[in-house]
Amino acid sequence: MEKHLIKVNRAETFEELASIAIDMLNEIYTSEDIIVQICGPISTGGSGDIRKNINRFKKSIEIARKKGLKVFDQTPFEESVARLSSKYKKVDGYCIDILEIFYRRIFESKLVGKVLFLPDWQSSRGARWEREITTKLGLIIEDYPIEWLSDFVD
């Protein structure tokens, strides 16, 4: 994991980040277990605060892992995604290439087999896109169980 984090911090493009993510997914992939990814607000929607949204993601991932799921954690990429987004064009103030390059490659790899959407996913431009692409790709889509978050306060 440490070698991947060094590469994440040095990456210069979303393509490089996607390749690192796929390498990480390949290392944890087995035909017996489905890899799950949590989807929801990070830079848009949710609490309106990126740090709070990322903390919520981390807690959601921790809880899902305690429930026995094999979860891909995309939060280590967020700092590099934010750093690199200034190099890409914006559409209505949003860097759509985060989705079209980074997340699309992850989902098209089919290494992630199931996505769990946090309760307020609709408030996020990115999560709405993720819902659309994962539906088209035929991934298993479920809502993140709200009761798993009942003890978690932002």
Image (cartoon, rainbow, N blue to C red):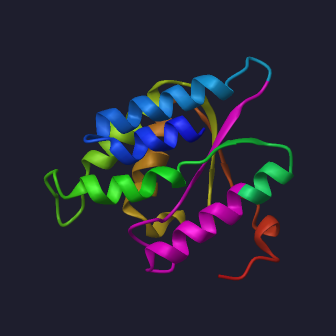
Residue at the image point whose x is 67% and y is 40% from the top: 36
Q: Residue 32: x percent and y percent?
A: 80, 20
- How many dots with numbers? 0
Residue at the image point whose x is 45% and y is 32% from the top: 20
Q: Residue furthest top?
A: 31
Which quadrant holds the N terminus?
top right
Figure check: 120 above or below 23: below
Q: Residue 117: x percent and y percent?
A: 61, 55
Start-end of magenta stretch: 33-61
Out of 9 and 123, give the one closest to the viewer.
Answer: 9
Relative horizontal placement of residue 71, taking residue 108 as reference (left or right): right
Out of 39 and 22, give the one closest to the viewer.
Answer: 22
Figure check: 90 above or below 112: below
Which of the 4 quarters of the picture holds residue 148?
bottom right
Q: Residue 5: x percent and y percent?
A: 50, 44
Residue at the image point whose x is 76% and y is 70% from the top: 149
Residue at the image point whose x is 33% and y is 33% from the top: 16
Relative horizontal placement of residue 66, taking residue 131 as reference (left or right): right
Residue 70 visible at all: yes
Q: Is residue 46 magenta?
A: yes
Figure check: 68 above or below 28: below
